[in-house]
Image (spheres, helix red, strand yellow):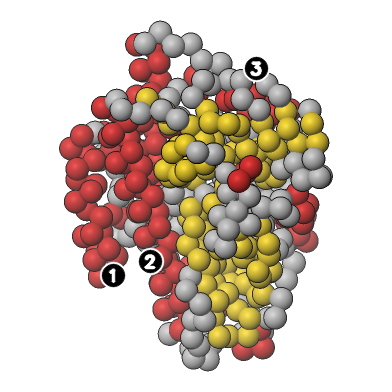
């Protein structure tokens, strides 16, 4: 292992690993997983590991993978296009009500969230009857979806339109935040919902079948890849690009619904939006040019941080979040972390923390404080301050946000 002032370099049997993990945990399971990934023959230059790294499926969360001639569907994952959106308002902290429960309630009423009935009829996390603005957005997405389903009929077996403009579960959230000047921001985290899951799962399965058919043995079956130029690759890229657009639209619709809800609630004075919203993916693929080559860049739990580009790095339910500006660091393929990163699994968090712990760690925040969100409690995540220090050569902080309201699915 070689050290610089900003990152570590690990030599492997394949390409090197460059890890921005100084001062943050890089558990052995995640390192082993990255080493398996690094052995693949079509990687470009190295694998870049972000400070929020932790073990995932196929590839670690917090990985940036540049490839020539193939994409690994499991490295992209099934929450295709998952990411963040945030917008500053003209409101200040003094204009918020003393009791924020009402603000949380109007947001929860405006945006379907969570999941009931195993996602079947009556699921509270999907629309019963979608509003006109969602129907209009779906009308623009529908032709692409129909073409995908025509090529891959199994992708059509589930909720799609009904999830557009909805939050989901797990680590997805909607927040009201204050920056260091006490300006109010709205911020949320979500992706491509059920349809992205079906697209990802379908092509992961196809890739695995192709590996068996071609007698290709991999160090991990979840590293199954789709070669560029193949018929499957074209179908995957079209579906992937569509799911990423669905995710971006999903976030924009939820932000619009959130702002409309609080504006008409009577709980706040009139306000304006101060800046164009930052809307960025952190589970996605894009075609980019790095070190003289056109490559496919897969960011699994990572945000593009090209020079001057704005991004969002959220903390956990009780920690700070950041609006950042990219520094264009080429060694990270112009990337940064997508959050704090888990330091323990969901099951381990449920064993480690009590409701009292959760209440203490989220003190002063209007949010759920029940057993079903223990796995999202702040103690389950790495220190966001340590993560930001580890990537100080990747981004600069524009605004520091702290939550005062958090809606979870």
Marks 1 and 3 sit apart, C-alpha to C-alpha, by: 52 Å
Q: Position of residue 131 (x, y in %)?
A: 28, 69
274 or 29, nearer to the observer: 274
Q: Residue furthest front?
A: 292
| Image disc number at residue 101 | none
Of residues 256 and 226, which is closer to you in this image?
Answer: 226
* Cα separation between marks 3 and 2: 46 Å
Of pointers 1 and 3, the one earlier in the residue sequence? 3
Residue 21: quadrant of the picture: top right
In screen coordinates, is 243 left or right of 72?
A: left
Q: Which residue is mark 2?
A: 253
Of 191 and 130, the residue lying toward us: 191
Q: 10 Å neighbourhood of mark 1: few (<14), some, or many (≥20)?
A: few
Residue 156 visible (yes or no)? yes
Which residue sits at x=60%, y=53%? 328
Q: Which residue is at the far top?
A: 215
Residue 190 at x, y = what percent?
48, 55
On the image, numbered disc 3 is attached to which residue?
13
Which label lies toward us, 1 or 3? 3
Residue 46 pos. (x, y %) = 60, 31
Percent coordinates x, y for residue 193 in the rendering: 40, 49
Q: Earlier in the sequence, mark 3 or mark 2?
A: 3
Q: Residue at x 43, y 85 (%)?
A: 264
Residue 174 visible? The answer is: no
């Amino acid at each position: 292992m070689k050290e610089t002032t900003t990152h570590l370099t690990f030599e492997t049997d394949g390409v090197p690993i460059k890890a921005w993990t100084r001062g943050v945990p890089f558990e052995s399971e995640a390192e082993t997983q990255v080493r398996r990934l690094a052995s693949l023959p079509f990687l470009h230059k190295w694998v870049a590991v972000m400070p929020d790294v932790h073990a995932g499926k196929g590839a670690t969360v917090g990985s940036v993978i540049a490839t020539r001639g193939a994409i690994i569907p499991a490295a992209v994952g099934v929450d295709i296009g998952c990411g963040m959106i945030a917008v500053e308002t003209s409101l200040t902290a003094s204009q918020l009500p003393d009791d924020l429960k009402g603000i949380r309630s109007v947001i929860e009423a405006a945006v379907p969230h969570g999941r009931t009935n195993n996602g079947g009829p009556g699921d509270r996390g999907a629309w019963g009857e979608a509003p006109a603005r969602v129907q209009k957005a779906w009308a623009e997405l529908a032709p692409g979806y129909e073409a995908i389903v025509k090529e891959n009929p199994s992708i059509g077996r589930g909720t799609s339109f009904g999830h557009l403009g909805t939050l989901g579960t797990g680590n997805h959230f909607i927040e009201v935040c204050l920056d260091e000047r006490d300006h109010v921001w709205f911020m949320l985290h979500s992706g491509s919902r059920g349809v992205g899951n079906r697209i990802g799962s379908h092509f992961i399965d196809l890739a695995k079948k192709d590996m068996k058919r071609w007698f290709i043995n991999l160090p991990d079956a979840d590293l199954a890849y789709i070669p560029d130029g193949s018929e499957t690759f074209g179908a995957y890229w079209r579906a992937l690009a569509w799911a990423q657009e669905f995710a971006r639209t999903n976030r924009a619709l939820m932000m619009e619904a959130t702002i409309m809800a609080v504006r008409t609630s009577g709980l706040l004075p009139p306000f304006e939006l101060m800046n164009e919203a930052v809307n960025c993916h952190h589970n996605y693929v894009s075609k980019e040019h790095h070190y003289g080559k056109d490559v496919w860049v897969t960011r699994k739990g990572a945000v593009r941080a090209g020079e001057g580009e704005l991004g969002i790095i959220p903390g956990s339910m009780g920690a700070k979040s950041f609006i950042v500006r990219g520094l264009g660091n080429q060694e990270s393929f112009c990337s940064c972390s997508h959050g704090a990163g888990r330091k323990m699994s969901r099951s381990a968090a449920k064993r480690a923390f009590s409701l009292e712990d959760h209440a203490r760690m989220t003190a002063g925040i209007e949010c759920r404080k029940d057993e079903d969100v223990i796995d999202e409690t702040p103690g389950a995540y790495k220190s966001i301050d340590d993560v930001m220090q580890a990537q100080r050569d990747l981004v600069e902080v524009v605004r520091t946000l702290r939550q005062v309201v958090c809606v979870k699915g």
